[in-house]
Image (cartoon, helix red, strand yellow):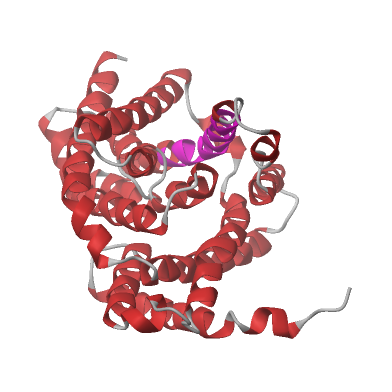
Amino acid sequence: MQFSATKYKKYTRGLLASIAVAIIASVFTHFVSFSTATVAIILGMVVGNYFYKTFHGDGSHFKAGVKWAEKDLLMFAIALMGINLNFTMLANLGVQTLLIIIAGMIFTIFMGLALGKLFKLNPKLSLMIGIGNGVCGSSAIAATSGVAKVSSNDIGISIALVNLMGTIGIFLAPALASLLGFTDIQAGVFTGNTLQAVGQAVAAGFSISPEAGHYATVVKMGRVLLLVPLVLILIYIAKRENANSSEEVKAKVGVPSFILWFVGFSVVASLGWLPKEVEGYISTVSHYITLIAMSAIGLMIHFGTIVKSAGTAFKVSSLLFALQLIFSALLISML
């Protein structure tokens, strides 16, 4: 099969715009406390709305490339992301800690859906907020959004809010652990089981003590590993929901190829088949491609949609994070 450059030429402008936003976001991250993904989405949203006709108007030369980056490129990044998951880390967790992690994830996701229903928030946005809080922040949202068929607007809002909660949690979780009289081990489990991003959990844990930092890291990585079964469960649910649909629709519901690659890279990392340097290179590539995709998602978000749902989404996200902290604290105190 002969490669056709013409086929991909229409993506060039939009892809370059996404890369430019990602580079600027990387620089801005050094001056703010938010994650690079959040900065990329916000910056992309500002640029995309300021130059609205350029990115959203009919006949836009940028739209095709941006849409390709926010979907196809993101799927590629997620596939490579599996290299960060080493299932042998589960051996470092006791049965009680595993129960705390699993119970916390299930509670957070279901409470996200329940709060969304209570406040009449879009169910898919509620699901993304629940998954982002319950598993591993932006990565979990990115990995599950394709399976759940979530819009760019909902992806952007959920990532921004989940990272905001996590930033607050860096200071709040250690303070609560101290107030509740947790030991260093309990405090590490608490921060690792409640904060959204790996970096946030590690920062909060080590701000308490080296021992708390170690347990926060291990527990947080345990939560990240639950991303694989979660994606498979979402695929199963999607199949069940389409059980009464036409044969044509049923055929479209299956395991996406990027998920198979994601699991494959996880297995490779767990079995140690690649040198650590190669794994580090793949992880770095995944990080930067994800950042480009986050910038593209931001470019496609319309302010009008944000205004309609951001207020309610903030309420749901804030209440959910509060309940997540309370639930984990109770579990740690009882077990």
User: In the displayed structure, does residue 184 sit left or right of residue 221?
Assistant: left
Judge by depth and name the residue closer to the eye, 256 or 160.
256
Q: Please tell me in which quadrant of the rendered image residue 108 appears.
A: top left
Please identify the quadrant where the N terminus is shown. Answer: bottom right
| Between 103 and 274, the one nearer to me in the picture | 103
The image shows residue 249, relative to residue 334, as above or below, that is below
- x, y (%) of residue 280? 59, 62
Residue for point 27% across, 44% down: 209
> Do we see residue 283 in this rendering?
no
Horizontal side of 205 relative to 242 (left or right) equals left
Quarter of the image containing the C terminus?
top left
**Where residue 58 sits in the image (x, y, percent)?**
44, 78
Is residue 124 toward the left or the right of residue 9 in the image?
A: left
Q: Locate residue 322 relative to residue 127 in the image: left or right.
A: left
Segment tinted magenta in the rendering: 220-239
Which of the 4 image quadrants contains residue 327?
top left
Is residue 277 shown in magenta?
A: no
Looking at the image, residue 155 lies above or below residue 331: below
Q: What is the chief secondary structure element of the magenta stretch?
A: helix
